[in-house]
Image: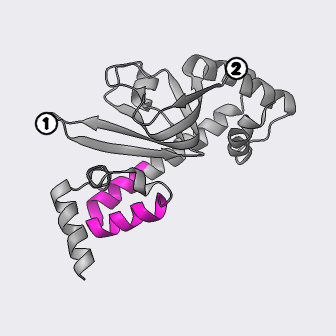
């Protein structure tokens, strides 16, 4: 087994124990893929048929509204999984784009191979259940924050959580992620500089 799989095996080991044979089988189902900055992992209208585990780099999932404004839903950095779960689960066209924010290496697991994994190593269902619960909790917290916290506090949280890659995002993208307009965000930054 190559060392390129160590990050995902460490991630899995936080939740479930695997034998060496199970580790090898799991890794055999994964496909490594390199993405350039601004390259899509998924486009709106496509059906999402895989999950991506980020080894290095950063990706974002977003949708475009009727005016063409980008609304970022998720930012995934190293050691995180990303997919359009609605499209993945229901086999429906995606409403999202998933795009590399910077050069990114990911390990891909197709829906079909994940089902094979569950059949062969059933405790992987526990692993993915835990991931799903955590993703739901993070999503719920994000919604709560957008509804209840001031924009300046949401921005501070963004900087704390994504300090390593914050510079890869434009002010417009950060504004989108924290749920404000670019104009409001710009005024907020000017106000912070003058205080």
The residue identified by callout 1 is 67
Which of 154 and 102 lies nearest the eye of the viewer?
102
What number is the disc on residue 87?
none
Q: Quadrant of residue 110?
A: top right
What secondary structure do most residues of the magenta stretch adopt?
helix
Q: In this view, does 101 lie to the left or right of 110?
A: left
Q: Where is residue 139 in the image (x, y as percent from the top left)?
A: 41, 49
Neighbour tally class for label 2: few under 14, some 14-19, many 20 plus, Cα within 10 Å: few
Residue 182 colored in magenta in the image = no
Query: Viewed as shown, does residue 141 lie left or right of 183?
Result: right
Residue 43 % position (x, y): 36, 25
Q: Mark 1 Cα within 10 Å, few/some/many (few <14, many 20+)?
A: few
Q: Residue furthest bottom?
A: 195
Q: Quarter-wise, where is residue 74 in the image?
A: top left
| Residue where numbered disc 2 is placed | 119
From mark 2 to mark 1, how far is it between C-alphas? 44 Å
Q: Is mark 2 on a helix, strand or loop?
A: helix
- Please indicate, yes or no, whether residue 190 appears anywhere in the rendered image: yes
Question: Is 163 placed left or right of 129 in the picture?
Answer: left
Q: Is mark 1 on a helix, strand or loop?
A: loop
Name which residue lies at 68% across and 44% down.
11
- Residue 156 highlighted magenta (yes or no): yes
Image quadrant where one finds the N terminus: top right
Residue at the image position 72 percent from the left and 33 percent from the top: 123
Count of labels shown?
2
In the rendered structure, which disc, 2 or 1, sits on the residue that comes first in sequence?
1
Is residue 38 positioned above or below 119 on the image? below
Give the residues in magenta.
139-163
Q: In this view, does 67 lie above or below 120?
A: below
């Amino acid at each position: 087994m190559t060392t390129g799989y160590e990050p995902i095996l460490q991630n899995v080991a936080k939740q479930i124990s695997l034998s060496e044979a199970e580790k090898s089988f799991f890794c055999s189902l994964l496909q490594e893929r390199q993405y350039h900055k601004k390259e899509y992992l998924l486009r709106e209208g496509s059906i999402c048929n895989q999950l991506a585990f980020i080894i290095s780099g950063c990706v974002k999932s977003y949708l475009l509204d009727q005016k063409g404004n980008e609304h970022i839903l998720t930012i995934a950095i190293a050691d995180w999984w990303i997919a359009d779960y609605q499209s993945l689960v229901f086999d429906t066209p995606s409403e999202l784009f998933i795009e590399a924010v910077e050069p990114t290496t990911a390990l891909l697991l197709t829906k079909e191979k994940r089902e094979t994994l569950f059949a062969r190593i059933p405790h992987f269902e526990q692993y993915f259940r835990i991931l799903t619960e955590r993703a739901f909790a993070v999503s719920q917290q994000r919604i709560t924050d957008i509804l209840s916290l001031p924009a300046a506090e949401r921005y501070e949280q963004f900087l704390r959580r994504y300090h390593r890659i914050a510079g890869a995002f434009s002010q417009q993208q950060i504004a989108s992620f924290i749920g404000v307009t670019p104009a409001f965000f710009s005024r907020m930054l000017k106000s912070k500089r003058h205080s």
